[in-house]
Image (cartoon, rainbow, N blue to C red):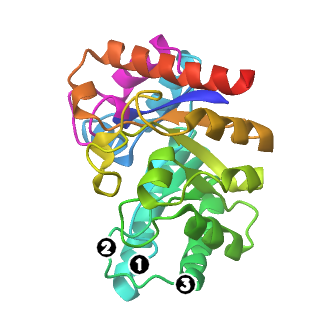
């Protein structure tokens, strides 16, 4: 697996104190091979006169590449004119991913319970953006989020991906969301590796706050929580996964640290977990 940095580990995607190119330099110094930026950061770079091709070049200068971009929004839940608007925005985000050389983009599920959950409808909409992604050479990855009232289980995302019948269909695996949503970790060992698009990596506290009240900001460095990360990595290795292992944290106390120290701690914790999985 390749060590990847999701830039939310350094700061909120809405925080403009560090540019995406500054984050690339910090990630490279910490030994990360890949980067997952957010569309918000890419928007801000362009708004301030930057060229997305410069981000791709900066990554290459540091011996890095983009793993994916986060994220497509609104593509599943709307109808009529709102759906058309959401698809137009997806096109813009696909183009951003293409411009920085990212082979994938995360496709986030509906955040609102107003969307009436239906596997077939979800698969139809996912198939639509899979076809759209082919135009840009960028693979959209089906995400589940443990704290939303819609697609919060791996089993749901897995089913939606399989129902499309599309060869590029795949899901985002994230231990925090497996824990928070109630999926557990048992399915991973039985997944076809083609369905694993990217693996986000993090840990979570056992009970402070309680499991089903936890939010993104409660994530902690790998090994500092209660999640079975080494068995999870062992299962991923066993099915043949060798893609990005992307450190994704939103912890405000980490954001307040020196950025280089934050990434050093995160990279060391991730490497230690992966080494333990390989030795098992």
Instruction: Point out the tag, 1 or 2, that comes first from the N-terminus.
Output: 1
Image location (x, y in percent) of residue 143: 51, 59
Q: Give the label on residue 121, or none.
A: 3
Say whether marks 3 and 1 touch (CB < 8 Å). Answer: no
Residue 24 lies in magenta, yes or no? yes
Query: For the C terminus, which image quadrant?
Result: top right
Q: Looking at the image, which is closer to me, 275 or 162? A: 275
Residue 79 placement, left or right of 232: left
Q: Residue at image x 57%, y 81%?
A: 119
Q: Give the label on residue 112, or none.
A: 2
Give the alpha-carbon distance from disc 3 to disc 1, as whole Å: 9 Å
Image location (x, y in percent) of residue 173: 57, 50
Residue 272 placement, left or right of 80: right
Q: Is residue 161 above or below residue 21?
A: below
Query: Please, which residue is most extreme toward the bottom here?
Result: 80
Image location (x, y in percent) of residue 21: 38, 25
Quarter of the rendering containing residue 27? top left
Instruction: Point out the tag, 3 or 1, that comes first from the N-terminus.
Output: 1
Total numbered labels: 3
Give the alpha-carbon distance from disc 2 to disc 3, as whole Å: 16 Å
Give the alpha-carbon distance from disc 1 to disc 2, as whole Å: 9 Å
Q: Which residues are magenta?
A: 9-32
Q: Residues within 10 Å of mark 1 (few under 14, many from 20)?
A: many
Q: Is residue 41 above or below residue 152?
A: above
* SS assignment at label 1: loop
Q: Give the label on residue 77, or none.
A: 1
Q: Residues within 10 Å of mark 2 (few under 14, many from 20)?
A: few
């Amino acid at each position: 697996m390749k060590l990847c940095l999701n830039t939310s580990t350094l700061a909120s995607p809405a925080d403009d104190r560090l540019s995406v190119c500054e984050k690339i330099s910090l990630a490279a110094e910490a030994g990360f091979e890949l980067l997952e930026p957010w569309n918000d950061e890419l928007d801000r770079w362009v708004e301030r006169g930057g060229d997305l091709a410069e981000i791709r070049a900066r990554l290459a200068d540091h011996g890095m590449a983009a793993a994916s971009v986060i994220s497509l929004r609104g593509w599943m839940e709307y109808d009529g004119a709102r759906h058309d608007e959401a698809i137009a925005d997806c096109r813009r985000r696909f183009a951003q991913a293409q411009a920085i050389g990212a082979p994938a983009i995360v496709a986030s599920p509906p955040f609102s319970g107003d969307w009436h959950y239906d596997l077939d409808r979800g698969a139809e909409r996912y198939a639509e953006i899979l076809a759209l992604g082919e135009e840009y050479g960028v693979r959209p990855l089906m995400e589940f989020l443990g704290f939303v009232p819609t697609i919060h289980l791996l089993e749901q995302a897995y089913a939606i991906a399989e129902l499309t019948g599309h060869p590029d269909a795949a899901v985002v695996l994230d231990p925090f969301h497996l824990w928070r949503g109630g999926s557990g970790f048992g399915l991973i060992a039985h997944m076809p590796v083609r369905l694993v698009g990217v693996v986000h990596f993090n840990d979570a506290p056992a009970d402070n706050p309680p499991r089903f009240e936890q939010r993104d900001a409660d994530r902690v460095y790998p090994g500092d929580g209660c999640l079975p990360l080494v068995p999870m990595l062992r299962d991923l290795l066993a099915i043949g996964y060798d893609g990005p292992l992307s450190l994704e944290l939103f912890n405000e106390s980490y954001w307040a640290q020196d950025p280089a120290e934050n990434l050093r701690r995160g990279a060391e914790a991730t490497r230690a977990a992966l080494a333990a999985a390989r030795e098992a």
